[in-house]
Amino acid sequence: MYEVEANIDDMNGEIYSYLYDKILNIGALDIYTQSIYMKKNRPAVKLSVLCKKDDLDKVCTEILKETTTFGVRYKQLNRKVLDRKIIKIKTKFGNISIKVAYYDGRVLKYTPEYEECKVISENFDIPIRKVYDEINYETSKYIKLISRK
Amino acid sequence: MYEVEANIDDMNGEIYSYLYDKILNIGALDIYTQSIYMKKNRPAVKLSVLCKKDDLDKVCTEILKETTTFGVRYKQLNRKVLDRKIIKIKTKFGNISIKVAYYDGRVLKYTPEYEECKVISENFDIPIRKVYDEINYETSKYIKLISRK
Amino acid sequence: MYEVEANIDDMNGEIYSYLYDKILNIGALDIYTQSIYMKKNRPAVKLSVLCKKDDLDKVCTEILKETTTFGVRYKQLNRKVLDRKIIKIKTKFGNISIKVAYYDGRVLKYTPEYEECKVISENFDIPIRKVYDEINYETSKYIKLISRK
Amino acid sequence: MYEVEANIDDMNGEIYSYLYDKILNIGALDIYTQSIYMKKNRPAVKLSVLCKKDDLDKVCTEILKETTTFGVRYKQLNRKVLDRKIIKIKTKFGNISIKVAYYDGRVLKYTPEYEECKVISENFDIPIRKVYDEINYETSKYIKLISRK
Amino acid sequence: MYEVEANIDDMNGEIYSYLYDKILNIGALDIYTQSIYMKKNRPAVKLSVLCKKDDLDKVCTEILKETTTFGVRYKQLNRKVLDRKIIKIKTKFGNISIKVAYYDGRVLKYTPEYEECKVISENFDIPIRKVYDEINYETSKYIKLISRK
Amino acid sequence: MYEVEANIDDMNGEIYSYLYDKILNIGALDIYTQSIYMKKNRPAVKLSVLCKKDDLDKVCTEILKETTTFGVRYKQLNRKVLDRKIIKIKTKFGNISIKVAYYDGRVLKYTPEYEECKVISENFDIPIRKVYDEINYETSKYIKLISRK
């Protein structure tokens, strides 16, 4: 995995949301920003993009084209990720996708898909917080069940 | 104008984008977040919402319902805003809306509408940065013209 | 309620944890910090303390004595808080305190007490994340029960 | 005292250092920035300026003229400041100005003037950190002396 | 040395203090967090842990078990550290441990142990800032003495 | 290229502006800071310096000497930079230096030199924002001209 970084101090903040979509569309694994301060009291933004080796060139070029920066820097990173599986859990809102992570074959953690929760929240007009609570409750029941076996 | 604030340290970060839309939809003027650190090394988020007096109750209730916070605080603020007008500028991408601000009757600054620039960028497949440059160029010409009169 | 603020740019960072305890001990409702940048590229910390009117003097004095700042500023804030009650929920770790908030007489949200979860996590040697999950599960069952009535 | 604020998301970061000087020159008491995040993933900067009532109009106008913002907001703040005096301390680098703060007539804290320390650091080619240490040492001796009386 | 990182956007902020202790207890050299912003306006926290090669596996596993993240990334870093020694300085509060750093055999900087200063501050009921001042004064005297030889 | 980092939690914020100058003077390519939070609620600053291999030793030593840190860490980075050229553009304020970046032989972006804009802003008493607008306008005209050939 590679991490590509650029310090940006003279770009309209409106452009970031558009930039995030563009960079993710060409295959980046993740993208995030941090606030930094450069010389001469300049508030700036450090853009970080995680990507696979095959996408490194594309990602660098896209950042150079779409932002005001004159150069990017990058480094290689190692990774350790949990095995994960998407399962479907039956809830009173219908079947929901849950991302489940395993460690040594046992369920370590799980999280419902945000986009599905958001749709439910809008359709049922319930705070999304409550949607998560209900789904986590149903998932807990299921996880208890399978870990008992 | 009122500013409503809440410190939130135990809410899923995925919820904010949904929250921003909800709060703006009920009439808030602006919404933003800042990173804060609370006691016991807790990274947290301070949510700030600007709204008119008439929307204060609605905004407070929405934050209490949609977030994990147990209380909000608010204060009154005064405001000084520039006169502003939306004008249309003819560019090679078509007519674009420009927000123009005046001070003592003279143009002080202007900015193209982000959403229109984004659509152009997608339709013409040009970096949004270049779309801004072109539109700013055409707006400059127009502003020079009217200020000469 | 009052909010007292001070910009601090020349204090050893080690002092904050000690300061948080001191300020909370004299009756402050909450305390938090934000990163700011002052003139001449100075990274600094804005300290904010929320307190009741009766504690305002004490809080101001304590900040002036314990930090390097030469002055504090404060303003009055209004507040809107949810009704709340501490209930006990029976879980496999024993009885746990849950802070429950109500809106119009109905349960709106709840959260287990952090300090109790931490003790359980240490005694049972289970990740605190799992302790929360289990307690939230039991609390969900209870809330479902009482809201059915 | 007043605090004037503006959220700025589309201004070149290079402008801030120039802006700080301009705003301080027209009489502001202090100026600082914080990183914020606005809707649609926009990294932005919240500019805060502290000023006296008489300078409020001038400060608002200057921010509207010099930045890209279309409006500012402001509120009144109360203040509690320590009595302070500039004294001269004799050190091996010459006489140095020390800002001394008093509480109930006794020395509470003191700090050497940064600009003088910087000049010494350059002239003597010593790390500024060491300049502070030496000056603090001499000031400690003096403070011990006067507090013994 | 290795640096292990994880972006965390859906974890209760209360857990960090507990996490810091856990990670330091298994041998990490240092741990810190930074505020970041991820796609879809998600405020998040980047956790960074510095550790030796031998502890890399343990640290990665602990982060995966104790936090909500589904993966960590890490990279190797080089280091340059000053020679350091703990000395005891006699002060009016008793003997205090001072961490002293050397460069080319000469004292470059020193700092009193925070935990000892905190205990003194509590026992003598003196602001910790004053405890540091007194100890720094005594240490200065000692350093002047040995550098004169 | 190398990136040198140090976490600093006990240094007077006034020192950073002086430090930036010192580090840039010995040949560093760039320098910036980020706010971090260390164990025990300590707000701190992460200092990052980018430099060439030949300057690595000098930069590490300077940070160790000028700051309170007891150690620095560093890693190698790769870089991808755009070809760039300084051109002169004739404006109503005189000839101004513009940094122009090329991609595949074509102009990709450009930016006027901040220091020259600042001088103009002071000499002509015009907001620097307006100086940038005028210069960008003239540069746009020029870029349109050469790209038409």
Image (cartoon, coloured by chain):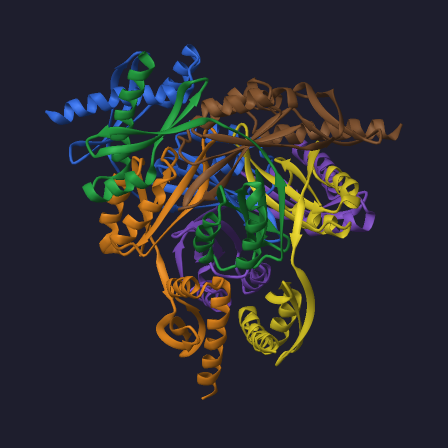
Chain colours: A yellow, B purple, C orange, D blue, E green, F brown
At a point 49% along the width and 56% down the height, the residue shown is: B49
Residue E59 visible here: yes
Q: Residue furthest front?
A: E54
Q: Is residue D137 left or right of residue A148?
A: left
At a point 27% along the width and 38% down the height, the residue shown is: E128
Residue B8 visible here: no
User: Which quadrant would residue A39 be assigned to in this image?
Assistant: top right
Q: Residue furthest bottom?
A: C149
State the image coordinates of residue D64 (x, y, percent, origin top left): 52, 38
In the image, is residue C97 above or below residue F107?
A: below
In the image, is residue C105 above or below residue F34?
A: below
Quadrant of the rendering where the C terminus of chain D is positioned: top left
Task: Decide which of E57, A90 is in the foreground and name it.
Answer: E57
State the image coordinates of residue C69 (x, y, percent, origin top left): 31, 36
User: Which quadrant would residue D127 be assigned to in this image?
Assistant: top left
Task: Decide which of F29, F85 is in the foreground and name it.
Answer: F29
Number of marks in the rendered image:
0
User: Which quadrant would residue D131 be assigned to in this image?
Assistant: top left
Quadrant of the rendering where the N terminus of chain D is positioned: top left
Q: Residue furthest left?
A: D149
State the image coordinates of residue F92 (x, y, percent, origin top left): 68, 21
In the image, is residue E51 above or below residue B63?
A: above
Task: Decide which of D109, C76 is in the foreground and name it.
Answer: D109
Q: Is residue D97 left or right of residue A68?
A: left
State the image coordinates of residue E138 (x, y, percent, origin top left): 25, 25
At a point 29% along the width and 39% down the height, the residue shown is: E116
